[in-house]
Amino acid sequence: MTATGSNPLHGKIIRRIVPYLMLIYMVAFLDRVNISFASLTMNRDLGISDTLYGFAAGVFFLSYCLFQVPANMLLSRLGARRWLGTLMVLWGIDVMATAFVAGSPSYVTARLLLGIAESGFYPGIIFYFTFWMPPSARTRILALFLLSLPLCNAIGSPISAHILLLDHALGLHGWQWLFLIEGAPAILLGIATWFILTDTPETAHWLSTDEKAQIQAGMHAEQPKAPASSGRTIGVVLRDSAIYFLWSSGNYGLIFFLPKILTGRGASTLSAGWWATLTFGAGAIAMYFASRSRGFRLLPPLIALAAVGFACVALIPSLPAAVAGFCIAAIGLMASVPIFWSLAASRLSGKAAGTAIAIVNSVGAVGAFCGPYAMGWLRDKTHSYIAGLWSIAACVLLGAILVVVDARAPRSTYAQGAVH
C-alpha cells in the first residue's frame, strides 16, 4: 500500500469519506472567515476600526488554540461522528447569533466562542485520516480534503458579496443576513454527521472483512520501527510549529484582508468577490497538482513563492497588481499546505501523532491571530496596507527558510524525500 492512486482500497476510502469531509470543512472555513466580507459594511455600522477588526479576526484563534489538544483527545474517546457533529451545531448557533452583536464587546465574545466551538474540528479531521491511511498514501487524501479551503473561498466569496445586497431586507443589514444564512448549514450538517460519518475502519459497514484487514496491515507496515526519543519528538514538533505559525500569519492575513485591499484599490464589493474567486481558484488548481507530489522537495519553494506574491502587492499599488500578487500568494500557500501536513503527520504515530498535530495547529492558530492583527494595527498606524503586506511576506519567507534548515537536520524525514 504505497500510493493511493494505484490502490483500489484507498480509492474506495477516498470516495466514501472525503467528499463529505470537504463539504463540512467548507462550511467550517466559511463561517470562520465570512467576517472578511461582512466587515465591508459591518465595521461602519458598528464603528469598528481596522485594529479592532484585525483583533477580532485573530482572537478566534486564541481560544481555538487553547482547546485543540483536549478536543483531539475527546475525538478519540467519543468518536468522529458524534464529536464533529456536536461541534458543528455549536458553532452554527454562534455564527447565527453574531448577526445580532451590538458593538465591540459582543463581537469579540462571539469570535472567542466560535474559536472554542471550531477548535477540535480541523485538527480532528487531520487526526481522523491517520485511522484510514498509512503515511505514504496520506499526502493525496490530505490534498483532496484541503481543496475545500480554496474552493470555499472561491465559491463563498461571490456568495457573501451577493448576500450583502440584502441590506435592509426585513429590517436587517446585509451583514446580518450573511451570518444568518451562512451559519444555518453548520447546524443542519452537524445533525447529519451523526448518521453519515464512520468513526473507524473497524466500524465501517461498507468495508469487507478482508478490506479491514488490508488497512490494518498497511498501517502496521509503516509504523516507525522504533519509537522516537522524547528529545527528537519535541524538536520535530517545535520545528513544525514554527513553520506553521509563519505560514498561518500569511494565509490569514491574505484571507481576512483581501476584500478590504481590493476595494481600497478601486474594486466594488461584488467585483472583489469575483476577484477573490480567481485568487483562490488558482490556489485550488495548484493544490490539486501538489497532491500528485510524493516527496517534500517542493515545500520550501512553494512557501517562498507566497512571499513573492505578497511583495508584488506591496510594491505595485494598483488593482491588477493586487489581483496578480494575491493569485501568486494563494498558489504558494494552498499548494504547500497538504505537503506540510503530510510531512508533519508522517513523523509520529499513534496517540503521539494526534497530540502533535493538535499542538502544531494550535501554534499555527497563534500565527493566524498575529497576521490579521498586525495587518489591522499597521493599517491604522500608517494609513496603508503596505507595511502589513511586507510584514507577512517576511513571515512567510522565514517559514520557507526554516523548512530548508529542517531538511539539513540529521535524520530529517524531509531530507529523506519521502515518508517512511
Image (spheres, rainbow, N blue to C red):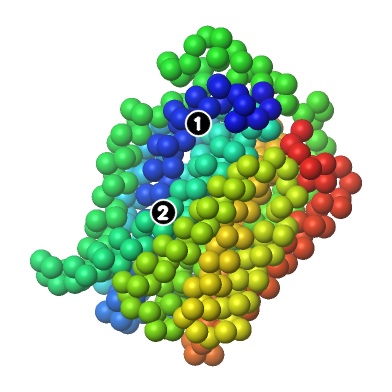
Instruction: Please tell me how crowded label 1 is: few (under 14), some (14-19), or many (20+) other residues with Cα within 10 Å.
Output: some
Q: Which amino acid is tagged 2? A: Cys
Helix, strand or loop for disc 1 = helix
Instruction: Please tell me how crowded label 2 is: few (under 14), some (14-19), or many (20+) other residues with Cα within 10 Å.
Output: many
> Residue 34 or 227: which is nearer the viewer?
34
Q: Position of residue 288 (x, y in %)?
A: 55, 47
Q: Which mark is residue 14?
A: 1
> Residue 286 or 185: which is nearer the viewer?
286
Name the outermost residue toward the bottom: 382
> Residue 90 or 300: which is nearer the viewer?
300
- At a point 49% along the width and 90% down the height, the residue shown is 383
Q: Quadrant of the N terminus?
A: top right
Mark 1 or 2, nearer chain start? 1
- At a point 39% along the width and 43% down the height, the residue shown is 23
Res. 133 image quadrant: top right
Q: Is residue 264 visible?
A: yes
Q: Number of labelled discs?
A: 2
The residue wearing badge 2 is 152
Q: Is residue 50 left or right of residue 127?
A: left
Label 1 – label 2 distance at C-alpha: 19 Å
Q: Is residue 403 left or right of residue 219?
A: right
